[in-house]
Image (tube, helix red, strand yellow):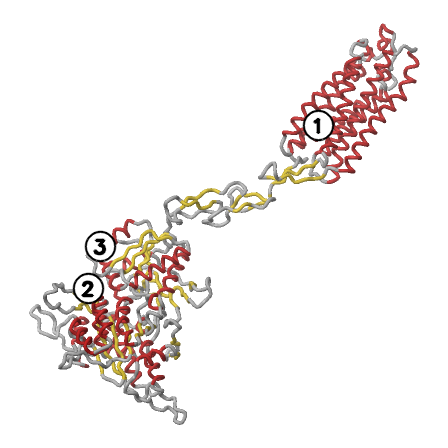
Amino acid sequence: MFDCFYVMLLFVLLVGAFGAEEDTALCEILGSPEFPLLSKEGDITIGGVFSIHSQISRPPLTFTDAPEPLKCSRINFREFRFAQTMIFAIHEINNSSSLLPNISIGYKIFDGCGSNLPSTRAVMGLINGPERTLEKTCSSHLSVHAIVGASESSSTIAMLQISGIFQIPVVSHFATCACLSNKKEYPSFFRTIPSDYHQSRALAKLVKHFGWTWVGAVRSDNDYGNNGMATFITAASQEGVCIEYSEAISRTDPSEQVARVVRVIQSGSARVLVAFLAQGEMDILLEEALKQNLTGLQWVGSESWITARHLATKGYSRILTGSLGFTIRKSNITGLREFLLQVNPSQDPYNNMLREFWEATFGCSFQSSPHGQTQCSGTERLQDIKNPFTDVSELRISNNVYKAVYAVANAMHNVLKCGQSDEVVNHPCIWKDALESKQVVKHLRDVNFTLQSGERVYFDENGDPTATYELVNWQRNQAGDVVFVAVGRYDASLPNGKQFTMNGINTTWAAESLERPQSVCSESCLPGFRQAVIKGKPICCFSCIACAAGEISNFSNSAECSRCPLEYWSDEDHSQCVPKVIEFLSYGETMGALLTGFSLFGASLTLVVSCVFFWFRHTPLVKASNSELSFLLLFSLTLCFLCSLTFIGRPSEWSCMLRHTAFGITFALCMSCILAKTIAVVIAFKAKRPANTVPQCSAPLQRTSVLSCTLLQVLVCMLWLTLAPPFPYQNTAHATERIILECDLGSPIGFWAVLGYIGLLAVLCFILAFLARKLPDNFNEAKFITFSMLIFCAVWVTFIPAYVSSPGKFTVAVEIFAILASSFGLLFCIFAPKCYILLLKPEKNTKKHMMGRNQLISP
C-alpha cells in the first residue's frame, strides 16, 4: 500500500517539477514537510539524511482521513555519530582559511529512519524547506546545494528519484548498491564507499579461499541486499561455490517469516552463512536466532554490519564471534572524539533530537516521570559512557561522512573559484547568488584532494572511490570484549589473483574454535579420485570415483583424471605417473635362473657324454656308432643347449640377431648330423656290395650332406639378417600396465623359414629312421633315432601354438623350453643307451656282440 503511495508521489512530482500549480498539488499530497533534526544557517547549505532512528511505525491508510504522520523511534547511536561527524567536518571547513575562506557552510540534517518514505519526505524538506506561503505553495528556491546520505541503498535511490530532477548532487557514505554506479540513471550520484560489485566478488573469493564450497545465504529484501546477493551468487558460481539456500527478510516482515528463515538456516547442512543484510534486518534476524538458539555457524558478513559495535556488545556476540567480513579501512579523525563528547542539550535547549539522545544515553528524562525514572540534569558526562556514539576506535563509515563533506566543499571551492585569481594570492571566493547545482555536480567529478590523514579522495567515471577493503575478524581480547581484528585485505585495483591476501594473523572461527570449520556438500576427493556429479544436485555435490588404470589425479577435487604418457603408468594410489615396469626374462628371476641352470646342465651333460665317447673311442660300440658323426652331433647339441642362453637377459641389437640365427644354425647342424647317421644306417644294412666297402663310400657322403644342409640354413639366416634383421622392441600394446621388452622378428617369414627348414630335416630323419626300425636288435640305432625324432617333433609342434599365445616374457620361456626339451630328448634317446653299455655293460661292448648272428659290421 505504501509502495502505491510512493509511485503516485513520484508521478505527481515528475509532473509538478515544471510549474507552480503542480507544486501546490505535490505539497498537498505530501503534507507538511518535516523540519530538520539538526540545522545551522550558512552561505552554502549541505543537507544530510541519516537513519538516526531504526524503527518506524506505519499508520493504517483508510483513504477517508488524512494519514497520521510516520513516527520514527529507537535511536541509533551509530547513525547519530555519523550526523555529528558531518557537523564536525563542516565546523572544520568553516574554520579553515584555505578551503572556502570567506564562505560559511550551513547544514540541515534529516532522519531517514532507514525507510523509503521518510527519506522521500526528508529530500522534499531539503529541496523546498518546511515553510509555507500564504498561498500554500512550496518554496520555488532550492534550500540545499548538496546532500550527504543516505545510509541505505534503497533510501538513496528513493531520494535520487527526486533530487536527480533538480541535478542536486547526492554523496552517500553508506549506499553500496552496484546499481547506483549507473551514471545514465543516476548522473548526480557520488559515494565515498565502494560499490557492492567489488564487495560481493571479494566475499566470493573469501569463501573460496577457505574452502567453503557449500554455503547458505540470507539478504535484505531491498536494493542493497538483492543486488549485492545477486552479484555474490554469480561470482561464487564462477569460483566453484554453491549456494544451498538463499533467503530474504525485511524489517517489516512478520515474525513468522523471520522465524521460518531461521529454521531454514538451522536445518541446512551448510556451516557457513553469508549475511548480506542491512543493520535493521540483521537486528531482527539475530533476535530470532537467539530465540531458536542458532549457534555453530560461521558468519560471513557484509560491510553494513560487520563492524557494528552494538552487535558486539549485546548478547549477539556469542553467535557472531569468529565472524568474517570486508569493510573499508578504518581511519583516525583528529579532534572528533573531543567534539562528540561536547554534544549536550544545552547547545540547543529547544532541539528535541539532542534531548532524546541525552535521555536514551543516560536512561533519564527531562520531564518529571510518575514511574520514578531519573530526571536528566544536563550535567551528565559522556566521557563516562561507552556506546557506539562515543566509540571512535572503528572510524570507518564515519570517515566516509567526513570525506563526503570535504568532497562537496572542494567542489564548491572550485565552483566559486576560490584562490584562483592570477593577480591576488588566496583570492576570496566569488559568491554567486544563483549557484547552480549542476555546476557542483560537474566539479565533484573532478575533485582530487588529500585529507589531513594522508588519504586521497577522488571519484572514478562512475562516481565511485577505489575499492579497497580490510578483512576483519571478530575476536575476543584479554578482557573478554569483542574486537575487530584486520586479518587480510582486498584491493580491486590489483590484477586478478593478487587482489585478496591474508596478513598472517591468526583467525578466530565460529564458536571461538581454533580449527577452521568445514562447509562442503561432499567431502573432498583425494588425489587418485575424480568428482562425479550427482544427478539433480549442484556441482558442489559429487561422489568420488577412483581413476581408471593408467589415469591419475594429482590434486584434491580433480574434475577428471588425466591419462599417463605411453611409457608411464599410474601408481597404486593413482596419484602420480611412474615409469612402467620393463619386463623381460632376466637371469635374476626364478624362471630365468631355472632355465639357465637347465641349459648349463644340458651343455655339461653333453660334454660328459663326449668325454665318455672319447675315452671309449676305440671300442666296437663307439666305432659302430660312427664316432665322427657322434662327436659332431655332441658338439652341435652342446651349442643347442648354450644358444638358449642368448634368449635370457635384456634384449639388445646383437642378442636379438644372435639368438635366432644361433638357434637356427645349431639345430640345422644337429638335424644334419642325425640325418647323415640315419642315411648311413640305412645304406649299411641295405647295401648289396661287400660290407667292407661301405664305410669308405659313406664317409665323404656324410660330410657332404652335413655341410650342405648346414650351409643352406646359414644362407637363409644371412638373407634374414641382411633384409630384415630382428631388433629390440618395446611392446606396449599387449599389456597396458607394463612394457614388454622383446625382440621383434623383423621378418616373420625369415623366422618361420628357419624353423620350417629345421622341421623339414626332422621329418626326413623321422621317415628314414622309421623305415629302418626293423633292423637287427643288436644294432638298431634307428629305433632310438625314431624315438628322438618323435620327441623332437612333438615338442616343436606343441611349441607353435604355445609360442603364439604366450604373453610377454613367457614367449621367450616357451622357446627356451622347446630348445632344451628337444635337445635333452635327442641327447637321452640317442646317447643314453650307448653310455649305459659303455659304463655299466662293458661285456656287450664287443665286436661279436655288435655283429650278432647276421655278421654285420658297423657302418
Query: Can residue 79 be seen?
Result: yes
Which residue occupies the foreground of this view, 294 or 106? 106
Tell me which numbered mark, 2 or 1, is placed earlier along the sequence. Answer: 2
Residue 235 in the image: above or below residue 618: below
Q: Secondary structure at mark 2?
A: helix
- The three-letter code of the residue at mark 3 reads Gln
How far is mark 2 from mark 1, CA to CA? 104 Å
Residue 346 in the image: above or below residue 77: below
Q: Which residue is mark 1?
A: 598
Task: Locate the C terminus and report the quarter of the image it occupies.
Answer: top right
Q: Quadrant of residue 1?
A: bottom left
Q: Which residue is mark 2?
A: 2
The percent coordinates of residue 330 (x first, y second) are 35, 71
753 on left or right of 149? right
Q: Quadrant of residue 670?
A: top right
Q: Which residue is mark 3?
A: 257
- The three-letter code of the residue at mark 1 reads Phe
The percent coordinates of residue 345 (x first, y second) are 17, 78
Tell me which numbered mark, 1 or 3, is placed earlier along the sequence. Answer: 3
- Tell me which residue sits at (65%, 26%) in the image: 801
Circle 3 residues within 10 Å: few <14, some 14–19, many ≥20: few
